[in-house]
Image (cartoon, rainbow, N blue to C red):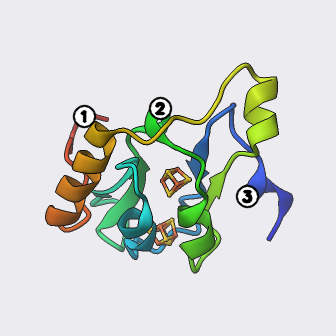
Amino acid sequence: MGTFTTVNPGNQPVWVNTNNCKACDICVSVCPSGVLGMRYDHTSTLGAMISVDHPEDCIGCSECELSCPDFAIFVAERSDLKAAGLSFAKLTDAAKERQAAIIANNYMSLNQGAK
Ligand code: SF4
Ligand code: SF4
């Protein structure tokens, strides 16, 4: 794994190297906070790509990073976020409900086309 893949592109709590992502849905399934979702992507041979839809609700649990088989998703160090004047979110009922809705939606983002 080169350094490029682990560089935070700009004080993000969670970010993706889309070159490595195989669109397997695993990270979406393990996120407790409804942060992630798959989006249809006709430019990808996979037909879909991971999307960080709600970074503001990332609680920094690292489940996504630990579960990804392809080292394609990364979570910031708490200290790095703090140095940037940022922090991870607390888990809310609304975020938990969104996660349940994403799972019910076959791991697809609930706001297709919003990006
Ligand atoms: S677990 Fe990794 S490879 Fe699978 S969808 Fe998430 S980022 Fe992509
Ligand atoms: S660190 Fe936890 S809350 Fe943040 S995107 Fe990954 S699984 Fe979701």
Residue 47 location (% of width, % of height) = 29, 68
Residue on which disc 2 sits: 56
Task: Please name the amino acid that badge 3 sits on.
Answer: Thr
Q: Which numbered tag is attached to residue 95?
A: none
Along the line of sight, the residue nearer the viewer: 87 or 4: 87
Q: Are marks 2 and 3 in contact (CB under 8 Å)?
A: no
Q: CA distance from mark 2 to mark 3?
A: 21 Å
Task: Please name the amino acid that badge 1 sits on.
Answer: Ala
Instruction: From the image, state whether disc 2 or disc 1 is nearer to you.
Output: 2
Examine the rendered structure and indicate whether residue 42 appears above or below residue 112.
below
Q: Looking at the image, is mark 2 or mark 3 earlier in the sequence?
A: 3
Instruction: From the image, state whether disc 2 or disc 3 is nearer to you.
Output: 2
Q: CA distance from mark 2 to mark 1?
A: 16 Å
Q: Would you call the spot at circle 1 few (<14 residues within 10 Å), some (14-19), or many (20 or more)?
A: few
Using residue 25 as the reference point, say whether residue 22 is left or right of it: right
Residue 70 location (% of width, % of height) = 60, 76
Using residue 86 as the reference point, say whether residue 6 is left or right of it: right
Residue on which disc 3 sits: 5
Q: Residue at x 20, y 45 (%)?
A: 112
Residue on which disc 1 sits: 114
